[in-house]
Structure formats: C-alpha cells, structure tokens
Amino acid sequence: AMPSVVIGSDHGGFALKAELIEFMNAMGVRVEDVGTRTPDPCDYPDLAHAVAVRVAGGGAGLGIMIDGAGVGSCMAVNKVPGIRAALCGDAYTADGARRWNDANVLAISLRATSTAELAEILDAWFAGAPSPEDDDRANVAHLSEIES
C-alpha cells in the first residue's frame, strides 16, 4: 500500500506542487496539501515546518517540500526531531535516500529539476523501501542518537 504524503511549497513551488499532487493521485497516493495555496510571497520555513510536524507526528507517512533550490527547505525540515530529509535531484539519490537512510521527507529543487526528472524521482522515492540490513538499520538508529 502507498503511504500517505504531506506536501508543501513556497510561492515559487506553488504550480509545481499542484502538478505533483495530480501525479501522485494518479499513482494512488493519498496527499495532504499544507500550502501555500496562492502565488503570493511567503516564507519557506513556515511551510517546511508544517510538513515536518505532520510527518514527525505520524499524521503522514512521508513528506515532500518544494522551493527554488530545495536546500533551505531541506535544512528547515531536518530541524524537526524525527525527520530525515534528503534533497534529491535524480532517481538514484531518491532510491538511496529511502533505502539506506530511511528518508521520510523529499526536498525538491523547483529550478534544478525537469518534469521528466521529477517523475523518475517520485517513482524511485515511492518504490524505495528502507533496507532491512543490520548495518543500514544501525546507521539510521545512530542518526536518531545524534539528534537526541
């Protein structure tokens, strides 16, 4: 079964977010949109925080956050305990983030990612599953130890 997803973006990512929601709905993914809902200027940390809190609190299985470069959003969501966010610009990174790092939030660069690449990234992200290998599980647990 597909996990539920919470998605957010700043004003720059507003149009792309709508496209991604359609794409995920077609994949059978249940999506919650935490905004922004207009093209008016807004601060990405607020939207990133909304995404991170939903994932960390168990309200969604995975999160996606979009801004111009993706870096600021990735930093912001990773400030929330329990979040392991990865900025992914290709399918290999998206698969690895899920597999080896049990990433639970995908950060996307609006400007550095083409529509074709986005489809590949999302396919890999949703196909990827956390590795059952002991060393991979231990590394993820170690991230939590560092966090606390």
Image (spheres, rainbow, N blue to C red):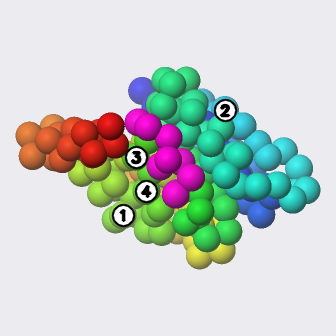
Amino acid type of the residue that numbered disc 3 sits on in the rendered structure: Arg
Pointers 1 and 3 in contact (C-beta within 8 Å) = no
Answer whether residue 79 is magenta in the image: yes
Task: Please provide the residue range marked out in magenta.
Answer: 74-82
Residue 71 appears in which quarter of the rendering? bottom right
Query: Between marks 3 and 2, how big is the CA–CA gap?
Result: 19 Å
Q: Disc number at residue 32?
A: 2
Amino acid type of the residue that numbered disc 4 sits on in the rendered structure: Ala
Q: In the image, which is nearer the foreground, mark 2 or mark 4? A: 4
Residue denoted by label 4: 86
Sequence-wise, the earlier of marks 2 and 4 is 2
Query: Between marks 4 and 3, how big is the CA–CA gap?
Result: 7 Å
Answer whether residue 147 is magenta in the image: no
Query: Between marks 4 and 1, how big is the CA–CA gap?
Result: 8 Å
Amino acid type of the residue that numbered disc 2 sits on in the rendered structure: Glu
Q: Nearer the viewer, residue 71 or 30?
A: 71
Q: Residue at x 40, y 46 (%)?
A: 84
Query: Between marks 2 and 1, how big is the CA–CA gap?
Result: 24 Å
Residue 43 appears in which quarter of the rendering? bottom right
Crowd around label 2: few <14 · some 14–19 · many ≥20 (10 Å): some
Picture layout, residue 104 above or below residue 43:
above
Residue denoted by label 3: 84
Query: Between marks 1 and 3, how big is the CA–CA gap?
Result: 14 Å
Residue denoted by label 1: 93
Residue 5 in picture, x, y percent from top left: 56, 35
Pointers 4 and 3 in contact (C-beta within 8 Å) = yes
Q: Residue at x 59, y 62 (%)?
A: 72
Q: In the image, which is nearer the foreground, mark 3 or mark 2? A: 3
Q: Secondary structure at mark 4?
A: strand
Picture layout, residue 5 above or below residue 93:
above
Crowd around label 3: few <14 · some 14–19 · many ≥20 (10 Å): many
Amino acid type of the residue that numbered disc 1 sits on in the rendered structure: Thr
